[in-house]
Amino acid sequence: MWISKRTDYATRALLALALSHDDRPLKTQEVAARTAVPHTTLEQVMLQLRSAGMVRSERGPSGGYRLNRDPSAITLEEVVRVFQGPLAPIACATRKHPEPCPMEVGCSLLGVWRRVRDATIEILQRTTFADLAREAGGSWLAPPLLQQGT
């Protein structure tokens, strides 16, 4: 499975919000600085996360974004599905509406692709942003300071 840039950026943004322990929303500039995500792309990603119900935005001078649910209730699977859709490695192995294949009868590949799909889903389902926050280290715990005026 290949993770798109937008999915990567979304997971970084959610992890930054999960690691924010003070009781204030984070501005997109601050999330961008903490995650090394381009600000303009991050704004678009945050809108998708908000539409999916994972984050909420707050207006005003002290506004910004915060998680809409507890980090233990947001899984990697949910994020990947929002940004990438089905998790099957090949169209004939999707759970809903698999693509017809002329090779399906007696195909020894289909079982392998289904096991890959199921293993991927299982790992992503059991990984929450609370788990990721507990395991975070390095620059995640010491985000760069924002420059004045940004």
Image (cartoon, helix red, strand yellow):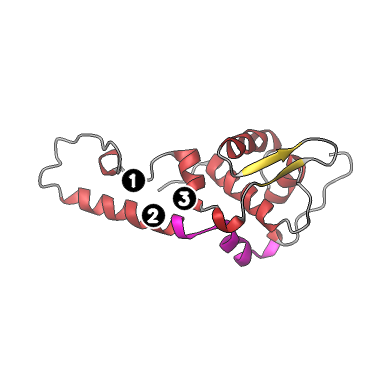
What range of the chain is rendered magenta? 125-138
Which residue has dot 3 on it? 77
Left/right placement of residue 125 relative to residue 24 reads left
State which mark lies toward you, 1 or 2. 2
The front one of 36 and 101 is: 101
**Which amino acid type corresponds to the residue marked 3 in the rendered image?**
Glu
Which residue has dot 2 on it? 120
Q: Quadrant of residue 59?
A: top right
Image height of 18 relative to 38, above or below: below
Residue at disc 2, secondary structure: helix
Contact? badges 1 and 2 (CB < 8 Å): yes
The kind of secondary structure the magenta stretch mainly shows is helix
Q: Quadrant of the C terminus?
A: top right
The residue positioned 64% from the left and 43% from the top of the image is 55
Give the label on residue 89, or none: 1
Residue at disc 3, secondary structure: helix
**Which amino acid type corresponds to the residue marked 1 in the rendered image?**
Pro
